[in-house]
Structure formats: C-alpha cells, structure tokens
Image (tube, rainbow, N blue to C red):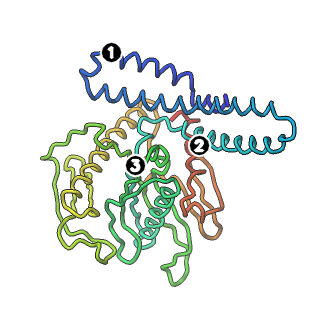
Amino acid sequence: MKRSWSVFDLPAKESRIAELRGETADPHIWDDPERAQELMQTLSSLDGQVQEWRELETATADLLDLAQLIEGEDEAQMASEIAQQAKQLEAKLATMRFRAMLSGPHDHRSAILSVYAGAGGTESQDWAEMLLRMYLRWAEQQGYASEIYDETEGEEAGLKSVTVEISGRYVYGYLRSEKGVHRLVRISPFDNAHRRHTSFALVEVIPDIGDEISIEINPDDIRTDVYRASGHGGQNVQKNSTAIRLTHIPTGIVVQCQNERSQAQNRERAMAVLRARLYDLELQRQEEETAKLRGEHVSAGWGNQIRSYVLHPYRMVKDLRTGYETGNTDAVLDGGLDELIEAYLKHAVGDGH
C-alpha cells in the first residue's frame, strides 16, 4: 500500500488541504469570486481523493484483522469470502493508482477530441474514421458519454475531419496521451493491386473548460458563416441553414458545429469549442516558453508522430514515446486503450511532466 500511496503522496495532499482550508476561512476570499471558486473546487477535489484512499486503507486493515480470526468449521468459507474481498480491493487499488497519475490542472475535465486525416486521400480518411470508432468504443467501455459536434466526410469513404466531445470525470487526463500523429500500415482495401499503404491522421485533444474559466473574445474578431448541415443522409440531415462556422480572425482557428437542430444551439456549441481551443493555444504558448528556458524542443502537430499501428506484414501497435507494444491490434482498434494510456502516464510521471 505504501508504494501506491507514494505515487499519490498522501501527506502532501493532506498538507495542501490544511492550507486551502486556512485560505477559504478568510472572510475576504469572496472579494475575488473566481479565485474563491477555484480554491473551493480544488479543496473539494483533494478532499474526495484523500477520503477515498483513507477508506481503502481502513478496509484493508479490517480485512487483515478478519483474516487473523479465521478458525473452526467455517474456515474454508471465510477464507473464500476474504479472498473475494481482497480481489475487489486489489481492483479498486489498481483503479486508484491509475487515477493518482492524473495530476494535471485539467485532468479531471471532459475532453474535446478532433481527428484530421493526413495526406493520402481515401486511405487517410478511412484511417481517421477508424480512429474515431476506436475512441468512441473506448468511451463506451468506460461509461463516458460522447457527442459528435462536426464531421466532414471523405469523397469516397471515411472522414476528412471530425470533432467529438467525450464527457466524464478524468476524460482529458486519460486522452491527453492521444495527442499527436497516428500512423497506419496495412494492405489497402481501396487498392485493386492489394499493395501496402501507410496512412497518417492527427489527433488533437483539449480540455473542455465549460464556463468555469473566463475567456474573453472580442465579437469583432469572429467571422460567422451559416451553411446547410451535411451528413450521412436520411432524415437527420437538416434542410435549413443551421450549421455554424466560426473563424477567429487573429489566430486563424476555425470551429464548425452542425449536429444540433437549431442555429442558436450550433453557435453555442461552436463558441464553447472556440473558447477551449483558444485556452489550449495559450497553454501551448506557455509550455513552449518554459521548454525554451529548459533548452528543450517541443514538437507539435504533424511533426509529432506518437504511435504506429501495423496490420501487415505483421500485427503490432507500438507507442513511440514509451516503447509499449502489443500484437493484439484488433483489441486496441476496438477501444482497448487502457494499457497504452497507463504506459504513457507512468512514462510522463517518470519524466516529471
């Protein structure tokens, strides 16, 4: 247990809770409502985390005490029950250790994930759709809700781009491991000569900041375009011009939303994504400045290849940052990302990121 708690650093968390309680006891704290709200949210989060670990500690101690009392006719039955409870505690410990690595300021938030097909036309567009399915399956397996905000279909198959919100606690903490370029090697299903093709897709993941963080946007800096929503056809395609495209002129960031039924709803969703992307842009700028001070190089966008998925001539998924690899490509593409995510988080913690 102590090894696991060292990852979480329980005494440091309890010390921080004591500091925060002292700060929140100050009657003048609400002179700055945003600061007060931030402190209260941090305190509530830390309180919950520490309580969860303390409850696990108590449950483990109680089970050990019970194990020492086993004797008599019911010994076999009691031993079986204790073994079952120990297995449940072990599973809970594994989950909590995993979550303890999520220490970033936005790790607890939901995430906005976008996939962009690289050069290569239909091959890369099909790869982008495969990645979308992988993340939607992962979200489903974790019990998270997902909603597609916008998608642009490929000419023959697949997607040129897609943006989806995945909602739930710690989604961003898990999925920030997916930022970067994903490479696929396979026999092309679109090539009559059955040649091997290499495809690329870029995955972007940003925290969904909601209304908790104030981002000021000058209305004069936004160009709004209204257009008719497109989709896979059928009755769900809107015949009116309800889709919204927002262009933030100073940064060139473009956000689209077409999946809501009204123009007002699409605009509201698009503004939420725009705020999140502008906030993420500022975070990137700060990280780049810090990296320059450290003498480090930070690669971003298409220059940052993070993972290879090889389906031919052999089958392997390999993370280029951590070295983790698996031959079970079908499981990964069906949403089995937990081991890849855990390897990344351990790697990041080890590097002090």
Left or right of residue 39, residue 71 in this image: right
Left or right: residue 11 versus residue 175 is right
Amino acid type, label 3: Ala
Residue 5: x percent and y percent? 61, 30
Q: Secondary structure at mark 1?
A: loop
Mark 1: few/some/many CA within 10 Å (<14, 14-19, 20+): few
Mark 1 and mark 2 residues within 8 Å of each other at the beta carbon: no
Which one is closest to the eye, mark 1 or mark 3?
1
Q: Position of residue 268 (x, y in %)?
A: 23, 52
Crowding near the residue tagged with mark 3, few <14, some 14–19, many ≥20 C-alpha atoms within 10 Å? many
Q: Residue at x 31, y 25 (%)?
A: 36
Sequence-wise, which precedes: disc 1 or disc 3? Answer: 1
Q: Residue at x 19, y 42 (%)?
A: 217
Q: Which residue is mark 2?
A: 95
93, above or below 154, in the image: above
Residue 194, quarter of picture: bottom right
Please name the amino acid that badge 2 sits on.
Thr
Query: Where is mark 1, residue-wise?
Result: 26
